[in-house]
Amino acid sequence: MNRWSLCLFAVLFALVPVSTSRSLEPPKSDAPLQPFGPARQPGSPNDVIRSVRIQAIRLADNEGWRPANIDYSQFQAWVDRANVIFAKAGLRFEFDPETGGASTLNSTLPNSNDGPAGPHWPQVWATAREVAAQYPGRLVVFIRYGPGPNPTSLGYSGTDFNFVMLPGFHEAFDCRQPNFNLLAHELGHYFGLAHTFGPYFAKRL
Ligand SMILES: [Zn+2]
């Protein structure tokens, strides 16, 4: 089992108690009992407790060079996968470029960031937080190129972040296949879920 599978299990197992607790709620009325119908499938519209609108911001350097490598359909693939995984928690993520849910920002500092352990982190942190705060009511996801000549493959987030940071779509690989779970993985960190594995994998993922 590779590290991404472990992370995925971390998300799934941590979310199971949420759906379990909902099933224990008492009836809300004394209306007559209805015949049993077919079981609802997880992720059906009736199971959505909260919709979360996403603002995807594709970064590039100041002059527009080194744009993060992603398009709308690729980002939507990440969102679709996240919706499958988080359906058990009643969460649904909405990504709609037609209503302003996608934007670009040419800013070398956040575009070249290497995460909390990288150089200029205080400035990166302040800039990213300031930009994210311009989208109240939306969960901001940055997609950046990274610090080197070759694009980074790392993403990160956490409960003290008001954003998620991701690499380009084709940089996120898992066993040589596109890693469709990466957004869901980092959203898990955003909502406070930790890895199930220990110090051996302690590097940022
Ligand atoms: Zn992680």
Image (spheres, rainbow, N blue to C red):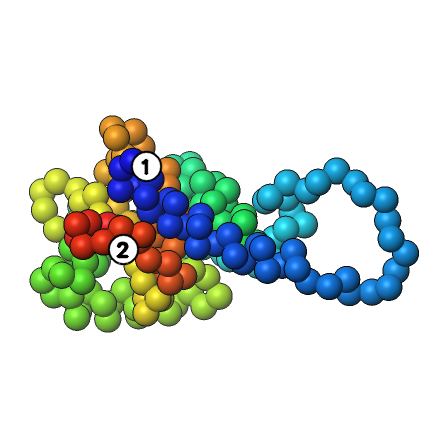
User: Which quarter of the rendered picture does the N terminus lie within?
Assistant: top left
Q: Pick whichever, 50 or 189, lies toward us.
A: 189
Residue 121 vertical position relative to residue 54 in the rendered view, above or below = below
Considering the numbered disc 1 on the image, is that residue within a helix, a strand or a loop?
Answer: loop
Q: Pick whichever, 1 or 132, lies toward us.
A: 1
Considering the numbered disc 2 on the image, is that residue within a helix, a strand or a loop?
Answer: loop
Mark 2, Cα crowd under 10 Å, few <14 / some 14-19 / many 20+, is many
Q: Amino acid at mark 1?
A: Asn
Q: Residue at x 59, y 44 (%)?
A: 43
- The answer to whether residue 68 of the structure is visible from this angle is no
Query: Number of callouts in the render?
Result: 2
Q: Which residue is mark 1?
A: 179
Provide residue 68's location: percent of width, then percent of height: 25, 44
165 left or right of 136 in image: left
Task: Determine which of the numbered discs, if any, sits on residue 158 in the image.
Answer: none
122 left or right of 10 in image: left
Provide residue 42's location: percent of width, then percent of height: 60, 44
79 left or right of 64 in image: right
Q: Is mark 2 within 8 Å of ligand 1?
A: yes
Q: Which residue is mark 2?
A: 156
Q: Pick whichever, 198 or 71, lies toward us.
A: 198
Q: Residue at x 86, y 64 (%)?
A: 30
Q: Amino acid at mark 2?
A: Tyr
